[in-house]
Image (cartoon, rainbow, N blue to C red):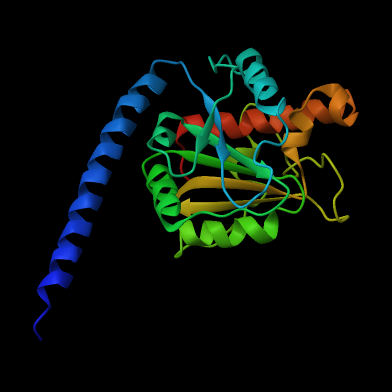
Amino acid sequence: MRIPRFTLQRYLRTMLFRIIALAIMSTWAHVHMFTWAQGSYQIAVLKYNGGGDWYANPSSLPNLARFCNTELGTDIITEIPTVEVGSPELFGFPIVHLTGHGNVVFSQAEAENLRNYLIGGGFLHISDNYGLDPFIRPMMQRVFPELEFVELPFGHPIYHQRFDFPSGLPKVHEHDNQPPKGFGLFWEGRLVCFYDFECDLGDGWEDAGVHGDSEANRTRALQMGANIVQFAFSGAEN
């Protein structure tokens, strides 16, 4: 069968663009991963399209960064940047955090960029702020069509880092009277995405006056957040 010339040319141009893009992203990731190794880190908020409030819980990540610096001895910068899903700047952050209550939309190009970031060593934490679940699952299916979220057992190392959570995630806020659950996406044995559901960790990291949570509740949420950070920085498998 003879392939029309214009079709072949379009295919070759597409493949050349992908090779160049991957080379650029690989170089970007290498440079920034070297920076991570020097001990200075930033955690970014992942900005997505679709109308959902990606900007929810503005005090949560600064508080988590301060807690980790105190309890884990990390050097996380407490000024929290925003990064878009499709941006090459995504590769400058060892961890990105996604939250919200509503619609989430990734274009195919954004999904591919996020996939390359996660496969290349990045880590995504998703925190359901209530109402996120029916939107985030199909978008992560777009990122990893071959993977499905699996519930992590209580013995998973993410629950047993600096702080021990023998019963899994703490319950921060009630949503639908269901127990909190932690789900994960695994790429070649490595946990690349952790999703807390019916838990609301991000709310628990907020300033005390925002939701009126008890100090004990906020501390448990921050401790679990520190575990996520420590696990992600360790690059552990399983």
**Based on the displayed image, in which of its 4 quarters is residue 165 positioned?**
top right
- Indicate left or right for 200 with 2 as reference: right
Name the residue at 18% across, 57% down. Answer: 13
- Indicate left or right for 108 with 22 as reference: right
- Residue 159, compared with residue 230, is above or below; it is below
The image shows residue 43 at horizontal and vertical percentages of: 54, 27
In this rendering, does residue 188 appear at all? no
In this rendering, does residue 202 appear at all? yes
Question: Who is closer to the viewer here, 155 or 230?
Answer: 230
Q: Going by the picture, which residue comes out furthest to the front?
A: 6
Question: Who is closer to the viewer here, 139 or 63?
Answer: 139
Q: Going by the picture, which residue comes out furthest to the bottom?
A: 1
The image shows residue 228 at horizontal and vertical percentages of: 60, 34
The image shows residue 134 at horizontal and vertical percentages of: 68, 61
Name the residue at 61% across, 15% down. Answer: 69
**Based on the displayed image, in which of its 4 quarters is residue 212 positioned?**
top right
The image shows residue 110 at horizontal and vertical percentages of: 44, 50
- Residue 123, compared with residue 211, is above or below; it is below
